[in-house]
Image (cartoon, rainbow, N blue to C red):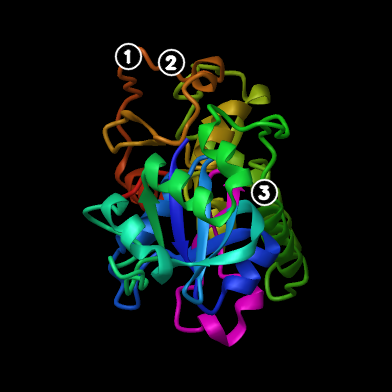
Amino acid sequence: MRYWWVNHKQTFHYEVGRGYIWCPKRRKDGSRNHFYETLREVQRGDLIFSFAAAHLQAVGTAKLPCYSCPRPDEFGKVGEAWDQRGWRVDVSFQKFTRPLRISAVASQLAPLLPGKYSPIQPDGRGNQGAYLAEISHALARMLLSLADPSLGSLTDRDELQDAEPLSTADPVVLVEWEDSLQAQIAARDSIPETTRRALIQARRGQGRFKQNVVALEPRCRLTGVLNPTHLIASHIKPWRESSDEERLAGANGLLLTPTIDHLFDRGFISFADDGEVLVSPVADPDSLPKMGVPLERRLQTGSFNSDQRHFLEYHRKEIFLKSAV
């Protein structure tokens, strides 16, 4: 389990009220921000403290690892200056009965603040530009003891308790996003019906898209399965984030078994240009071997062509769950 501090500003009521944290992927100038990249390494079961209006307001447990998704509609004009796509973590928040004014206890917290990338200053004021910062177990324990001692046991758990079993199901937000895009495609009279059908089938890795992928990728690169009946044509740059041309491009796909498709689509694994399998620090080491990704050796699956490398670069930068800074 890891511990995190999130600095909410104008979006506090949306995020805590609806159970998530979200940030853009980059700063306004296009550069990466350490405090945005940290979301990529939040794991299911991690503890997240919510700070807003000078007070520690709530504590929550991450329900799922991070995923890429659009800026929440409810942000409205508040987030107009941000990128349309960002990182999201679904969180089960519990508000404190009495929010804790951090400046009043700053002297107690100061010795436990991170030496680098601290979410707050020693006097208790939030650090400008800091959204999500990792904090120590000791600081997490102190925060709970000051805010609500009855919740102190949250920091002593070895694993997430009373949670639903892990599932390969996609987050609801992603399903709704893709449903909306599919409806838009179905309603477009500007393209032939056969093309609309091919684009919709491509969402599930079938139809013309799968045929295009099979021409380049004859088997699952990790499991070696050859029978196309048991394989999904998985988009490298996700269908939901692709243009029409990219949705059907064979170079934007890999033939994968369903479990490998899940790991790849959600960013738990990726590939280097030379074919080395990259494993996210968020991925469950107990589950991976059972799902077809052995960890006892370096996995090399063979190099990719130039078009495939173009899409893989996108996957590593925009989907793979590993901080880039």
Q: Is residue 36 visible?
A: yes
Q: Nearer the viewer, residue 202 or 158?
A: 158
Q: Earlier in the sequence, mark 3 or mark 2?
A: 3
Q: Which mark is residue 171?
A: 3
Query: The magenta stretch spans which residues?
Result: 60-89
| Secondary structure beneath label 2 | loop
Q: Are marks 3 and 2 in contact (CB under 8 Å)?
A: no
The amino acid on which the numbered mark 3 sits, given as a three-letter code, is: Pro
Q: Residue at x 32, y 30 (%)?
A: 275
Q: Give the mark nearest the N terminus, 3 or 1.
A: 3
Name the residue: 63% across, 29% down. Answer: 258
Depth check, front residue: 27 or 225: 27
Of residue 24 and residue 191, the one placed in the foreground of this image is 24
Q: Amino acid at mark 1?
A: Arg
**Circle 2 residues within 10 Å: few <14, some 14–19, many ≥20:** some
Query: Was residue 90 drawn as part of the magenta stretch in this picture?
Result: no
Residue 181's disc number: none
Please, what is the three-letter code of the amino acid marked with disc 2?
Pro
Q: Position of residue 134 (x, y in %)?
A: 37, 50
Residue 319 seen in the current view: no
How far apart are the two marked residues, 3 and 1, measured between alpha carbons?
A: 31 Å
Q: Tell me the SS state at disc 3.
A: loop
Residue 37 location, x and y as percent?
Answer: 37, 55
Q: Residue at x 58, y 47 (%)?
A: 149
Q: Name the mark on residue 294.
A: 2
**Do callouts 1 and 2 mark residues in contact (Cβ within 8 Å)?**
yes
Looking at the image, residue 244 lies above or below residue 308: below
Magenta region includes residue 85? yes
Using the image, tell me which numbered label, if any, was put on residue 297: 1
What whole-number distance in Å separates the C-alpha atoms at marks 3 and 2? 26 Å
Q: Secondary structure at mark 1?
A: loop
